[in-house]
Image (cartoon, rainbow, N blue to C red):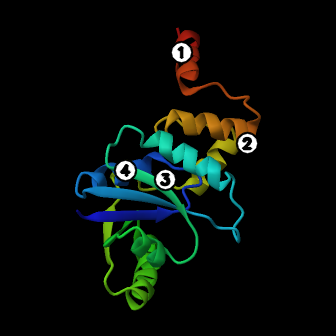
Amino acid sequence: MVTAIYPGSFDPITNGHLDIINRASALFDKLIIGIYDRPDKQMLFSLEERLALAREAVAEVHNVYVKPYSGLTVDFIRKERGKIMIRGLRMNSDFEAEFEMAMMNKKLAPDIELICFMTSSEYQCLSSRLIKEVAKLRGCLEGLVPEHVAVALNEKLCGGYLEAPAEKASHRNKTSL
């Protein structure tokens, strides 16, 4: 059984992440989404909230599990008996950062392989940081995050003021007639 680990902060999980998760889960027996507890970095969602959002997003994928971790990613991968680390690459800047991290991880854990997935074109410019910015400015998140994540962002950043994507589309259709 081959276990792969997809680590990240997932603050919040996006459709870009889910694209990588769906593609990776088709290739490995078991895929663990490792959600990093980063006390040194200001997160919008708590670790518990990020775990819940990710678990709901992957609930229908039978071989995907969501677990928290702290410390070195390679230590978490070993603890979970993983052999492969999954990463997504959107553009050149991602490659440079991932390459540097991969070289350090290879020194720390030569037995763990890195497999990078090129992001699907529709998610190339998508990041959790940009998603939070769009949500804060009350922009439409349809197609960028799962609906339950859009609701959570709305509640966290806008006090629940925004309409759900389906309501917005219905409202647009009524006003454009």
Q: Which residue is mark 1?
A: 170
Q: Which one is earlier in the sequence, the residue at label 4 or at label 1? A: 4
Element class at badge 2:
helix
Which one is nearer the viewer's eye here, 169 or 103?
A: 103
Asked if residue 24 can be seen in this view, the reply is yes
Quickly name the residue at label 3. Answer: 126
Disc 4 to disc 1, how far (Cα)? 34 Å
Q: Position of residue 170 (x, y in %)?
A: 53, 15
Q: Is residue 116 left or right of residue 35?
A: left
Do the numbered discs 1 and 2 sit on residues whose CB atoms are within 8 Å? Answer: no
Q: Which label lies toward us, 3 or 4?
A: 4
Near mark 2 (Cα within 10 A), the count class, few <14, some 14-19 or many ≥20, is some
- Residue 145 percent across, percent down from the top left: 50, 41
Residue 15, compared with residue 170, is above or below; it is: below
The quadrant in which residue 106 appears is: bottom left
Residue 44 lies, in percent from the top left, at: 69, 53
Q: Is residue 69 left or right of residue 109?
A: right
Using a 10 Å C-alpha cutoff, classify the residue at mark 4 as few (fewer than 14 neighbours), some (14 to 19) or many (20 or more): many
Q: Is residue 150 left or right of residue 4?
A: right
Query: Which residue in the structure is indicated by mark 4?
Result: 64
Q: Residues within 10 Å of mark 3 (few under 14, many from 20)?
A: some
Tell me the quarter of the picture where residue 9 sits: bottom right
* N-terminal label among 3 and 4: 4
Numbered disc in front, either 4 or 2: 4
- As shown in the figure, which amino acid type bears the numbered disc 3? Leu
* SS of the residue under disc 1: helix
Task: Say what secondary structure mark 4 lies in.
Answer: strand
Residue drawn at 71 percent across, 71 percent down:
40
Q: Earlier in the sequence, mark 4 or mark 2?
A: 4
